[in-house]
Amino acid sequence: MEASARLTELGFNVVLVERQGRLGGHVDNWDFLFPDRKPAANILNPLKDAINYKVEVKLSSEISSIKKLNGQYVTSLSTGDFIKTDAILVATGFDLFDAVKKEEYGYGIYEKVITAADLEEYFSGKNGHKLLRKDGRGKIGILHCVGSRDEKAGNEYCSKVCCVTGVKQAMKLREYFPGYEVYCFYMDLRMFGRYFEDLYKEAQEKWGVQFIRGRVSEASETHDNKIMVKFEDTLAGKPMKISLDLVILLTGFVPAAGALQLKELLSLETGKDRFFKPVDEHLKRNHTSRQGVFLAGACTGPKSIAESITEARAVALEISSFLKNNE
Amino acid sequence: MMVKDKFGFSIHADNQVNLDKGDYSLLQKIMAAEPGFLNCISCGSCTASCTAASFTDFNFRVLCQNVRRGQNTNLMNELSKCMFCGKCRLICPRGINTRKIISLLHKELSNTMQYA
Amino acid sequence: MNIEGKRRIWKAYQKEIADDRYYYARSCIRQNFFPGSETAFLRILKEELGKDIHDDPRHTTCTGIAYHCDVIPFETTMTVVARQFSLMSEAGYTNYVPSCITSFGIYTEILETWHHFPEIEAKVREMLWKSTKREFSKPANLAHASDIIYKFRNEIAAKGKYRLINQHTGNPLRVVEHIGCHYSRMFPHKGVGGAEYPYVLAGMIESWGGEVVDYPERRHCCGFGFRQYLVKANRGYSAACSKKKFESMAPFTPDMIITNCPGCPYFLDRWQFVIAEMQGITYGTAGQGIPVFTYEEVAGLVLGYDPWDLGLQTHQVAVEPLLDKLGIPYDPEMKYKAEGGRFIGTPEYPEVLKVC
């Protein structure tokens, strides 16, 4: 959306093709964002306003084929429409790792095991689940690196934003359910952005969130309907177990389902992590080896919303430059 | 006849720590007096600079870790190795008043004698 | 717990199991620990299911125990296994069915090794020829004996006289299922249901009317392994492993345990005696322990075979309370009598564990 708005400002016509029935992608599912806790709607509404009536939006449309004809790209959609353009911006984003694949955590089997995305839906009031009693006492666990940094899951890369998401959610859980202790089980804490270290300290100091450096190996249901997890407290050097009333899995990023299809249609390169590979990591982060085809956002790898917006603005300028030079 | 003699072996104890059974009362007392205790990121700078750590097996980082996990056995014995020199306080990147923690632990342990 | 979640995973881990013409490779030690099991397996396959299963007296140990104890090198094990395959082809079969789970693990490991490193397979052919003048073909299908019973569990249920239901209460029996480590941990796709939620025994239990008990230490090893218990002084380690499982399953009040490995039921059965005598702790009700069975014994009970023909008198933990729950009649007088009525003697009675 941001790239469309910028390109429109620069004087170009943009067609935005979206496979879902609404704009907003994953951000539409989030409750509030790091680092400043602003509601997700505060990002989405301005973006939607900026393209309203200015950009042609095609919802519920998937790409059937893309051909190059007389120097232009002709894209056929599943709706039967086709579009002729001088450039293409691939912004397919990401999907979340399917937590069912980590069988040892029992997602989809044990009701008390949910994902971070499920929790965001709960916080934003979208699913009416009763997670825990507000006046209850107990323990909640947040498991980092689910489906990331994991050879067994097929994703050896780090998904970057999950650690700060875990810290953010930990604080909100302590706020919502003050009688519950919250434990974060991590391998490394990747507080990569501005103010993230402050969030970490606030989580510890103000909210009493406990951080245990040790990856959870297995989860099982106990006879009193709690989830028992096993881990090593690597800093104490001892194997441990604990029963939790709720387990939250911080699932990582995987390339979006549609990305593979676009890879074939446009003959794009992907890296070892299966995300799209730009021509150069420093000076041509938004360029592919195909003339006129650009990349932006999480389709080139895990990144935060702020970074995606920045990339959108950068790629708008790159596309503008390309189109002007190729007139 | 000793059971062990009859069988020739004895059953190994389970050394997996069960955090459900930890005794967090000491942790609660320390946190009430010094909330910064939970700010620790276990970086190990304290133990690295510690005077006592070089000459005994005293490990301040591990000691605090154990208190946070509700594992309080043998605490007084370990704590008696600290010389109160303050090097840990000087180095802590999280600004935790480690010397106060040690002082609080001493006070609690002497008062109650229950964690000896 | 959402059972649908498990069913989805079970569906993802299915494997090819041959449906007839099996070459049976017996276990080295099962016949000592659980004498009726292999006989029951053969009887069920031949008489109940009408299958062609070949019981070959010429096969040897697969050397699994020795290999896992570092007493025999891998090359020797592979050559012995090659001879087993040669015997199988000679007898005219291509479907290999080992009785022991460690064997199954060995065969799977070796076939995978040969698949990825054909030069090793070539070397083994050479070694077999040099030592025995034999040639071999790899089996078309390798399935563990429990896979076969799993495959025909519904047929067995249909012919069954008894279900895994408590006659006094009408409720399904609560059954703990324990899978041998070597079944699916190394190659999850070679086990029915995979490694996290194996289905080979759970499927049998469901089919025969029981209720599967899921407990936190479900995945834990029973401690059999090999090298850790060969030396008597180390056995405390093995016993501790089984004890951890018992402590974890006890709150779920299981009525019985079923396993598919030779060592596992042996340890889960005998260690209850050791723990009782050493520490005064028993599991189950009334100090009687939780009875442990092999899947063949349970299949036999379901089909109405005589408990003493199934070898249940050799179990340490008393099986009679469970037979009563199942409503299966048995003659206590015949428990320690061989065929023909000859009295074979009673075992020494434990002090703490209550036996019948």
Image (cartoon, rainbow, N blue to C red):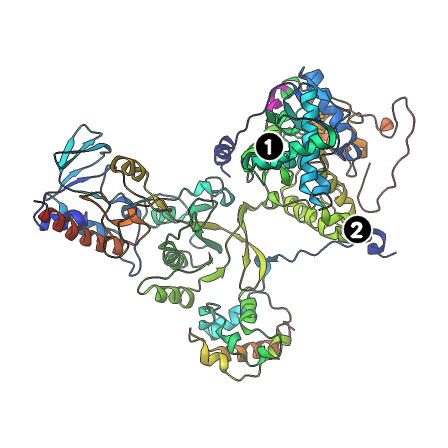
Q: Nearer the viewer, residue C308 or A111?
A: C308
Q: CA distance from mark 2 to mark 1?
A: 34 Å
Q: Is residue C111 left or right of residue C269?
A: left
Q: Which residues are magenta?
A: C151-155
Numbered disc 1: secondary structure: helix
Q: Amino acid at mark 1?
A: Ala
**The disc labelled 2 sits on which kind of residue?**
Lys
Residue ID at (57%, 58%): B19
Which of the 4 image quadrants contains residue C19? top right
Q: What's the residue at 60%, 31% (across, down)?
A: C200
Q: Nearer the viewer, mark 2 or mark 1?
A: 2
How would you classify the magenta stretch by its main secondary structure? Answer: helix
Where's residue C201, x and y in %? 62, 32
Which chain is mark 1 on? C
Question: Callout 2: helix, strand or loop?
Answer: helix
Q: Position of residue C177 (x, y in %)?
A: 63, 36
Query: Where, by quadrant of the figure, is residue B66 drawn?
Result: bottom right
Tell me the residue that label 1 is attached to.
C202
**Residue C58, horizontal then vertical, whole percent:** 77, 26
Q: Which residue is mark 2?
A: C232
Whether residue C175 is visible, yes or no, is no
Determine the residue positioned at 13% across, 40% down. A86
Among numbered discs 2 and 1, the one appearing first in the sequence? 1
The image quarter containing residue B22 is bottom right
* Residue A228 part of the magenta segment: no
